[in-house]
Amino acid sequence: MPSCKSSDAVRVKPWLAHTPQPDEPPPDQPGEPDVPPIGDPPEPPGEVPHARPRFDPSVSSRFHRSRDALPAP
């Protein structure tokens, strides 16, 4: 008399079945990745990355005050 385990092995659920994978490309042909790389794409050659300008307190009007702007003692 067959047990439940042997009958379950015959009736495999489709979502549990093995998913066939594509064949590996031949070694002389480079393969393309299936997913895009994570992160930003690399900059095109010859372009300089645009950096945010540094904060210069001597230029800022909040920190740079002339002596004429001070109240008279």
Image (cartoon, grey):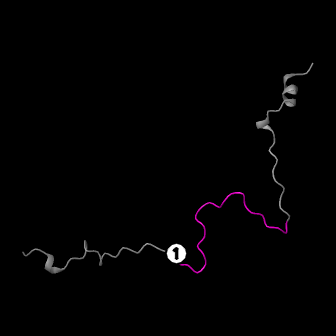
Residue 25 location (% of width, % of height):
83, 61
Q: Name the quadrant of the C terminus.
A: bottom left
Nearer to the camera, 71 or 61: 61
Which of the 4 quarters of the picture holds residue 24?
Answer: bottom right
Nearer to the camera, 56 or 51: 51
Question: Which residue corresponds to mark 1?
Answer: 49
The residue sitting at 93% across, 18% down in the picture is: 1
| Prevailing SS of the magenta stretch | loop
Q: Is residue 22 magenta?
A: no
Q: Residue type at mark 1: give it.
A: Pro
Which of the 4 quarters of the picture holds residue 28?
Answer: bottom right
Q: Residues within 10 Å of mark 1 (few under 14, many from 20)?
A: few
The residue sitting at 81% across, 42% down in the picture is: 18
Q: Is residue 44 magenta?
A: yes
The residue sitting at 16% across, 80% down in the picture is: 67
* In the rendered image, the vertical position of residue 20 relative to residue 44, given as above or below: above
| Direction left: furthest residue | 73
Left-right relation of 55 to 38:
left
Left-right relation of 41 to 70:
right
Residue 64 location (% of width, % of height):
24, 76
The residue sitting at 74% across, 63% down in the picture is: 32
Residue 65 location (% of width, % of height):
21, 77
* In the rendered image, the vertical position of residue 61 relative to residue 35, given as above or below: below
| Direction right: furthest residue | 1
Q: How many marks?
A: 1
SS for dot 1: loop
Left-right relation of 15 to 27:
left
Give the magenta-colored segment's residue range. Answer: 27-48
